[in-house]
Amino acid sequence: MLQPILHTDLVRSGARDPDAWMVVIPGIYGAGRNWRPVARRLVEAREDWGVILADLRGHGRSPHLDPPHTMETATHDLEETLRSLGRPVRAILGHSFGGKIALTMGTRGHLPLEQIWVIDSTPEAGDPRGSAWGMLRVLRVYPGPFRDRDEAISAIESEGYPNRVAQWMSTNLVSHGDGLTWRLDPDQMEAMLRDFFLEDRWSIVEDPPQGLGLHFVRATDSSVLTETSAHRILEAGGRTGRVHLHTVEGGHWLNADNPEAIHRLLVSHL
């Protein structure tokens, strides 16, 4: 039997496996557990669905694995992990870096997907930017060890991030001697982010496979999805009827900023 490469958690409403599963791919610095409240509410409202929460390489409880740390290797990790689980995956939700992995998986056609949800991410290539890119500075300037979690949170806030984001980022701290340090390797995170900005995934947006719907969710307080890209997504939706753009109040980390809006969208459209 195949062994999963990545750590996953399965969320369902009862003991019986549902007929369809959605895999959640967090973004850089995130872990599946960050999406557990969203997943739990979803399966309670939609008992026909289960959720697979995945940790990317070097994140959460997954191993760091060998380089190269790219979109290709991260996608391979996930595909092999899902193959080992053997669940009928019908939908993918990807946030930020995970959003482009979700689009990549859609282009490959290895899964009988019905929907892909792209949460504050972009199909375009371009120069590195945004709050996730800026968080690299935090990892490098404030590597720890910290006396306690509050000291780390204060360091993150000193770089201009709101408390709710700092609280979330602090879940990446692990014990080290008498203090706390980051579990995340900044060089690995930078390599993954640089490859993210190099990759273009417009082909699946312009011509999604038959039977596959794409749902882009754009955060109002984020610059990740530009006006030009948003307009292009809307145009693709007008041509195909299978590409949708939803605008939600909040910043880039919508699972922390506005989980209620994400819940309503999923329950209504999944």
Image: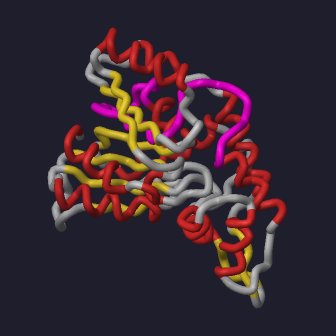
Left or right, 118 with respect to 115, comes to right
Q: Is residue 84 magenta?
A: no
Residue 160 image position (x, y, % from top left): 69, 58
Q: Is residue 79 visible?
A: no
Principal SS element in the magenta part? loop
> In the picture shown, does residue 199 fall above or below 98?
above
Q: Is residue 176 visible?
A: yes
> In the picture shown, does residue 127 fall above or below 235?
below
* Coloration of the structure image: secondary structure
Residue at image coords 75%, 47%:
190
Left or right, 160 with respect to 254, comes to right
Residue 28 image position (x, y, % from top left): 61, 51
Residue 112 image position (x, y, % from top left): 30, 31
Left or right, 171 with respect to 13, comes to right
Residue at image coords 40%, 30%:
110
Q: Which residues are magenta?
A: 106-131
Of all residues shown, which one is farthest toward the right?
A: 141
Of all residues shown, which one is farthest toward the top?
A: 239
Residue at image coords 22%, 57%:
43
Q: Is residue 126 magenta?
A: yes
> In the picture shown, does residue 169 fall above or below 154?
above
